[in-house]
Image: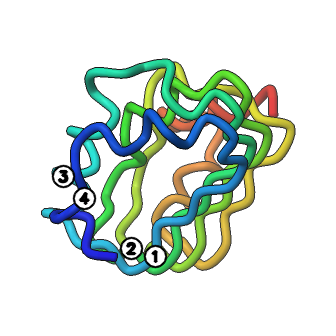
C-alpha cells in the first residue's frame, strides 16, 4: 500500500489492530505517516507490536511511537541509518534491534543519549 494515498483518518476503524509493520519506507512516507498519528494520540488502542523493517531513510524512531499505551514489543530490523530512539519512549517488555549498526553502537555505550531510554528495558 502506498502510504501517501491512504486517507488521514483510516486508523479510527482499526481499534482491534494488534500488529503493525512498516517495511521499506522512505522519508517522505514517514512524513505522511506522521499526519496519521498527530491528531489522534489514542488511535490503535490494541496495538501490541510494531515493526520497522528495511527503512533505510529512518534516522530516528518517530515520536508518535510513544503514544501507544498497550505496546509490548518493538522490533527494528535492517534500518542501517537509524541512530536514535525518541524521548519518552514506552518501556515495552521487549525491544529487538537487529542489523541497525548505528543504533546498536549508540545503545552499547552507557554514556550515550540512548542509554537512559533502554537501561530499564
Q: Nearer the viewer, mark 1 or mark 4?
A: 4
Across and down, in percent, residue 81 comes to 35, 70
At horizontal 48% and vertical 41% (from top left) the residue drawn is 85
Label 4 SS:
loop
The answer for how far apart the CA atoms under marks 1 and 4 are is 16 Å
Q: Tell whether label 3 touches label 4 (CB within 8 Å).
A: yes
Residue denoted by label 4: 6
Across and down, in percent, residue 11 comes to 43, 41
Q: Nearest the camera: 62 or 31?
A: 31
The answer for how far apart the CA atoms under marks 2 and 3 are is 14 Å
Q: Earlier in the sequence, mark 3 or mark 1?
A: 1
Residue denoted by label 3: 32
Q: Tell whether label 1 touches label 2 (CB within 8 Å).
A: yes
The answer for how far apart the CA atoms under marks 4 and 2 are is 19 Å
Residue denoted by label 2: 55
Across and down, in percent, residue 120 comes to 80, 26
Q: Earlier in the sequence, mark 4 or mark 3?
A: 4
Q: Nearer the viewer, mark 2 or mark 3?
A: 3
Dot 3, crowdedness within 10 Å: few (<14), some or many (≥20)?
some
Corner quadrant of residue 118: top right
The answer for how far apart the CA atoms under marks 2 and 1 are is 6 Å
Split into 4 quadrants, where in the image is the C terminus? top right
Task: In the rendered structure, find residue 23 and report the number of the disc placed on it.
Answer: 1
Q: Nearer the viewer, mark 4 or mark 3?
A: 4
Q: Earlier in the sequence, mark 1 or mark 4?
A: 4
Amino acid at each position: 500500500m502506498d502510504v501517501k494515498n491512504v486517507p488521514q483518518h483510516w486508523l479510527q476503524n482499526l481499534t482491534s489492530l494488534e500488529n503493525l509493520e512498516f517495511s521499506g519506507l522512505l522519508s517522505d512516507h514517514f512524513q505522511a505517516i506522521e499526519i496519521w498519528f498527530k491528531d489522534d494520540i489514542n488511535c490503535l488502542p490494541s496495538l501490541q507490536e510494531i515493526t520497522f523493517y528495511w527503512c533505510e531513510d529512518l534516522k530516528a524512531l518517530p515520536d508518535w511511537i510513544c503514544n501507544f499505551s498497550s505496546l509490548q514489543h518493538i522490533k527494528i530490523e535492517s534500518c542501517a541509518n537509524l541512530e536514535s530512539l525518541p524521548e519518552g519512549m514506552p518501556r515495552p517488555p521487549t525491544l529487538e534491534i537487529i542489523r541497525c549498526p548505528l543504533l546498536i553502537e549508540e545503545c552499547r555505550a552507557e554514556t550515550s543519549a540512548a542509554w537512559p531510554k533502554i537501561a530499564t528495558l
